[in-house]
Image (spheres, grey):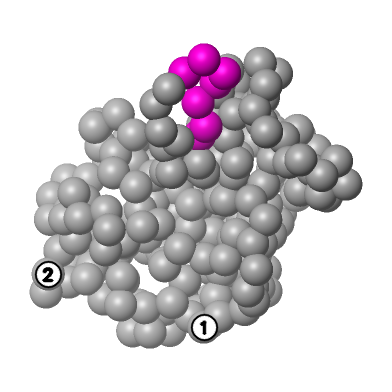
């Protein structure tokens, strides 16, 4: 149900169960939150949110790898540009552990198309991706793939399915081009990776970082 205050589930108990501490409403979904190492695909919302929130490996749910340069993230290349700026990239993909960092590029077809391994010192939760519903009186259709930041007035009108982090203080460990670099316009092929939010290189939604809960508070959301 949509009112001027935002969107709610008709059942108050269901609404309560699916609203997070920031007041964001999350999608109700069936199915299992398990899966293999194809971690760059769009994950089950429960699994994505847990891994992203707690900075667990998207492949195995163990703590993500980290060293003095930060936490490990492996992201698909968004295009065939060689000068992509990864600083400030916004992503729905959680970080990765050491074991999965070795396995994922072979196991995940999205990464086989080309990927970059990053070390990330700061990964602030900045918002969610989900379905943005029109306000009362607006006649347009819902946007099924909207990025809504936490300071946006749209936040009460979104039903979230992914947590988004912005990666900063990024070190590129290596970049592995694939045989067929990903065309960011083919969003249907890689639904996890939305097209650039603003069209500028640092504003791409791709995946997301790792740290512990400390780093989450250190990065500003707590
Ligand atoms: Zn793992």
The span from disc 2 to disc 1 (Cα, nearest Å) is 23 Å
- Res 84 visible: yes
Which secondary structure is most common in the magenta stretch?
Answer: loop
Secondary element under disc 1, as helix, strand or loop, is: loop
Point 76% across, 40% down: residue: 10
Residue 115, given in percent of the width and then of the height, sits at 29, 65
Residue bearing mark 1: 36
Of 119 and 126, the residue lying toward us: 126
Point 47% across, 71% down: residue: 39
Residue 137 sits inside the magenta stretch: yes
- The quarter of the picture where the C terminus appears is top right
Q: Is residue 28 left or right of residue 81?
A: right
Q: Quadrant of residue 109?
A: bottom left
Point 60% across, 41% down: residue: 159
Question: Mark 2 vs mark 1: which is more N-terminal?
Answer: 1
Q: Quadrant of residue 3?
A: top right
Secondary element under disc 2, as helix, strand or loop, is: loop
Circles 2 and 1: CB atoms closer than 8 Å: no
- The quarter of the picture where the N terminus appears is top right
Residue 9, given in percent of the width and then of the height, sits at 73, 41
> 53 above or below 136?
below
- Res 72 visible: no
Q: Which mark is residue 180?
A: 2
Q: Is residue 19 left or right of residue 87?
A: right
Tag 1: Cα neighbours inside 10 Å, few (<14), some, or many (≥20)? Answer: few
Report the span colored magenta. 132-138
Of 82 and 49, the residue lying toward us: 49
Judge: label 2 CB < 8 Å from ligand 1.
no
Of 105 and 134, the residue lying toward us: 134
């Amino acid at each position: 149900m949509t009112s001027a205050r935002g969107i709610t589930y008709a059942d108050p108990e269901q609404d309560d169960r699916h609203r997070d501490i920031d007041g964001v409403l999350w999608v109700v979904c069936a199915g299992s939150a398990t899966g293999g190492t194809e971690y760059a695909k769009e994950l089950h919302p429960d699994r994505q949110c847990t891994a992203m929130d707690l900075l667990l490996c998207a492949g195995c749910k163990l703590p993500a790898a980290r060293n003095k340069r930060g936490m490990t993230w492996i992201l698909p290349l968004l295009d065939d540009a060689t000068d992509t700026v990864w600083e400030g990239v916004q992503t729905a993909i959680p970080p990765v552990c050491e074991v999965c960092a070795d396995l994922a590029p072979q196991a995940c077809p999205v990464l086989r198309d080309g990927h970059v391994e990053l070390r990330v010192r700061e990964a602030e939760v900045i918002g969610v991706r989900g379905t943005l519903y029109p306000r009362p009186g607006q006649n347009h259709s819902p946007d099924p793939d909207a990025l809504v930041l936490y300071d946006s007035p749209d936040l009460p009108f979104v039903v979230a399915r992914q947590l988004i982090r912005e990666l900063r203080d990024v070190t590129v460990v290596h970049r592995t081009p694939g045989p067929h670099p990903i065309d960011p316009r083919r969003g249907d092929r890689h639904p996890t990776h939305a097209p650039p939010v603003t069209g500028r290189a640092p504003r791409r939604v791709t995946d997301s970082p790792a740290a512990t809960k400390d780093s989450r508070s250190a990065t500003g959301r707590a």
